[in-house]
């Protein structure tokens, strides 16, 4: 049986702000349960959930035989219901769903929540049946929820349209959950109850035949009760809408935490460029999360814990993490977890350390993490926390401690004094603090009462998940504080006058977009090559020029560091000969002659069109090892210079940008400008571009040059590419 929900806030106006269709779906004025039966455990539980939560609308039961169902009179059809129907809940076999939806539409219903399974998730006839259902509903302007769903829990408005027993949280605000898995949504709702996490909504979207998860995400961004949003998704069915919602959440300062399953790499469309091997579905999604400040997690437990922490702390100020515990071992675990998550633990200043030393036992040492020791005087905890807060180096303070007692025999005056002292210090100085159990645990009526009485900022998620959650909120906060908003807009659709195919043509196009490129000349004979090299008067690169050969070095089509006219002539003949041996049908234009660039850093820039998300740019360490290292950061196009610098900072090899032996520090502004312009060139090519690759983009100090470039196009119907 569901628990009582007297602790929930009074219901809001069922239609705030007018006729918002999602709000009307989530807070209907009246509900008809179609397929209700005394033998149906689902219909009985759904009715009990609505009764127990204090739903203020009318609930009608529909059964073709009429009679008494769940202790109330049932109607034989939707048309018999007096006063109309706002939403129908459909609990009939799949073969009867369309007839029921027709009955609902004829009765003037606004929406239908279909809990029945056996549709597109089963393939075959299920797909056809779902398509017919959607076509009919849209023709009749009836919004569908599901099918194949458990329903939703709208705690904020007291509408628990849910088909299994549920316990309501103690608070109807905090985290809003949108899940494409009903079972996972149920697990999170139960876990939230066990750990006393406030929930505004739990929405199990099912197959999303008509109304997809993004519509609910967008709605929760607008709800003041929802301070953080937790998403469990298998796929994003409407990428443009998802991006718009992510932009809105970033602008409104509302954190989104996501667990995306099915993360095995799905390669992008096959193309000759390296980009096709680097850009997979999950990497693109990871780039999108970074671009829009979405916090990505790896487990359901971490999803809920992180969203709860984000809902409670909001945007954190710049700084690291301070850790206080009464266990040296726990301090060491916290330090390890923080390092794994990239969270800094700034040391205490000399002044703070001296003051803390006076407040801890003589055998303790004032460091961060701070082992208060088992002998700490509880009266000193409040002052210690305040000292750390005032130091100014910490964005948050974490106190892993014994859990709040869940049973009467666990109550200890000393533990209560320790918890209370830490809590008072955490509440006074404006630095968010978390009192967290050593390991994941649960709450009881007793522990909830203690937490409320002593106003403890308590999380029962355990140390590991607390550190992971803080790390995610720190990243989101940094993105929130950045001056530049997310820059994605609809990509440019302009077309080039002609498709550049050879490297020489590609570099000329990039140059027209303002990308700095290495000076190149096209030689058609070995004599011309020697003359061009003489004018350069330094070692040159000799590369085959052909629109049909993508990776020239693989066939011996590149000779580097050539000095001397005879050597240049010989190199010309070598690359042309190699091209003809390996690609007899290829068009050979000659060879490109360009000055060598040495003692610099080589980057890779690739643009491609992801089949789901559209134009994407990849930036990473380049050269011949690009596919092996796979040290790349991805974003949706277009990007601005600020976003490019964020991408550079994400690389595992980012330290190389700060300079290395014989190579000066990189001018990040110069690199960002060049990469931004490469992205603009790719966007201007429109949907016919498979990939644009610049490898390498050579960087030395403030000098940046594209040394090699490749445009890979979709075949033209009238003139297919040579085999």
Image (tube, rainbow, N blue to C red):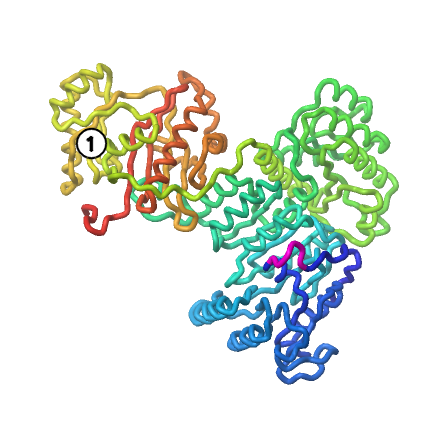
Quadrant hosting residue 459: top right
Instruction: Tell me the residue that label 1 is attached to.
Output: 544
- The rendered magenta stretch, by its main secondary structure, is classed as loop
- Relative to residue 156, is residue 103 depicted above or below? below
Location of residue 43 (image quadrant): bottom right
Residue extending furthest toward the top: 537
Residue in the foreground of this view, choosing between 384 and 638: 638
Q: Is mark 1 on a helix, strand or loop?
A: strand
Q: Which residue is drawn at 28% across and 30% down?
A: 507
Task: Residue 174 in the image: state x and y as whole percent.
Answer: 69, 48
Residue furthest right in the image: 413
Whole-percent x and y of residue 347?
A: 67, 24
Q: Give the range drawn in magenta.
A: 15-20
| Residue furthest to the front | 18
The quarter of the rendered structure image containing the N terminus is bottom right
Q: Can residue 113 be seen in this view?
A: no
Q: In this view, does 292 lie above or below 376?
A: below
Q: Nearer the viewer, residue 68 or 244?
A: 244
Residue 454: x and y, percent?
83, 43
Residue 248: x and y in percent read: 56, 44
């Amino acid at each position: 049986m569901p628990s009582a929900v007297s602790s929930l806030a009074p219901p809001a106006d069922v239609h705030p702000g007018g006729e918002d269709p999602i709000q009307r779906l989530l807070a209907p004025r009246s509900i008809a349960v179609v397929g209700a039966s005394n033998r149906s455990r689902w219909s009985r539980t759904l009715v009990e959930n609505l009764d127990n939560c204090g739903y203020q609308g009318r609930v009608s039961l529909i059964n073709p035989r009429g009679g008494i169902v769940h202790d109330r009179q049932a109607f034989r059809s939707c048309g018999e219901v007096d006063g109309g129907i706002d939403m129908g809940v459909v609990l009939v076999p799949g073969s009867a769903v369309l007839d029921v939806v027709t009955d609902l539409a004829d009765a003037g219903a606004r929406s239908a929540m279909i809990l029945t399974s056996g549709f597109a998730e089963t393939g075959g006839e299920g797909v056809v049946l779902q398509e017919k259902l959607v076509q009919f509903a849209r023709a009749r302007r009836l919004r569908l929820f599901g099918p194949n769903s458990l329903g939703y829990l709208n705690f904020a408005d007291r509408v628990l349209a849910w088909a299994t027993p549920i316990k309501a949280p103690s608070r109807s605000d905090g985290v809003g959950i949108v899940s494409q898995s009903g079972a996972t949504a149920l697990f999170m709702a139960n876990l939230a109850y066990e750990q006393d996490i406030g929930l505004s909504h739990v929405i199990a979207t099912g197959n999303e035949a008509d109304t997809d998860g993004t519509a609910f995400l967008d709605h929760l961004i607008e709800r003041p009760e929802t301070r953080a949003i937790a998403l469990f998704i298998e796929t994003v069915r409407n990428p443009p809408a998802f991006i718009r919602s992510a932009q809105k959440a970033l602008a409104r300062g509302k954190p989104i935490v996501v667990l995306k399953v099915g993360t095995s790499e799905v390669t992008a469309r096959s193309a000759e460029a390296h980009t096709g091997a680097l850009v997979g579905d999950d990497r693109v999604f990871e780039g999108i999360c970074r671009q829009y400040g979405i916090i990505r997690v790896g487990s359901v437990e971490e999803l809920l814990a992180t969203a709860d922490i984000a809902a409670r702390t909001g945007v954190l100020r710049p700084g690291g993490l301070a850790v206080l515990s009464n266990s040296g071992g726990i301090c060491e675990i916290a330090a390890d977890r923080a390092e794994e998550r990239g969270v800094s633990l700034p040391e205490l200043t000399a002044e703070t350390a001296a003051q803390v030393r006076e407040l801890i036992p003589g055998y303790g040492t004032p460091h961060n993490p701070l082992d208060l020791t088992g002998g700490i005087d509880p009266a000193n905890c409040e002052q210690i926390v305040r000292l750390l807060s005032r130091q100014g180096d910490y964005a948050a303070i974490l106190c892993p401690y014994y859990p709040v007692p869940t049973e009467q025999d666990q109550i200890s005056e000393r533990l209560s004094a320790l918890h209370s002292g830490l809590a008072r210090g955490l509440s006074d100085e404006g630095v968010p603090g978390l009192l967290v159990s050593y390991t994941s645990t649960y709450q009881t009526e007793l522990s909830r009462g203690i937490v409320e009485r002593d106003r403890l900022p308590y999380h029962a998620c355990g140390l590991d998940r607390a550190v992971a959650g803080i790390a995610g909120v720190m990243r989101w906060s940094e993105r929130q504080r950045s001056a530049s908003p997310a820059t994605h807009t609809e990509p440019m659709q302009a077309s080039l006058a002609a498709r550049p195919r050879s490297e020489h043509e590609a570099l000329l196009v990039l140059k027209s977009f303002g990308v700095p490129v290495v000076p190149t000349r096209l030689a058609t004979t070995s004599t011309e090559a020697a003359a061009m090299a003489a004018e350069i008067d330094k070692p040159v690169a000799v590369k085959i020029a052909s629109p049909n050969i993508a990776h020239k070095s693989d066939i011996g089509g590149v000779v580097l560091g050539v000095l001397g006219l005879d050597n240049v002539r010989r190199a010309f003949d070598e690359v042309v000969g190699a091209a003809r041996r390996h690609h007899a049908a290829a068009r050979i234009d000659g060879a490109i002659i360009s000055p060598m660039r040495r003692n610099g850093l080589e980057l890779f820039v690739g643009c491609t069109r992801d089949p789901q998300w559209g134009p994407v740019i990849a930036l990473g360490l380049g050269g011949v090892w690009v596919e092996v290292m796979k040290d790349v950061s991805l974003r949706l196009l277009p990007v601005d210079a600020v976003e490019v610098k964020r991408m550079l900072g994400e690389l595992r090899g980012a330290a190389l940008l700060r300079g290395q032996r014989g190579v000066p520090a990189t001018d990040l502004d110069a690199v960002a400008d060049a990469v931004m312009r490469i992205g603009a060139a790719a966007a201007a090519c429109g949907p016919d571009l498979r990939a644009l690759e610049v490898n390498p983009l050579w960087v030395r100090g403030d000098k940046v040059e594209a040394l090699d470039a490749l445009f890979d196009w979709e075949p033209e119907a009238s003139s297919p590419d040579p085999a």
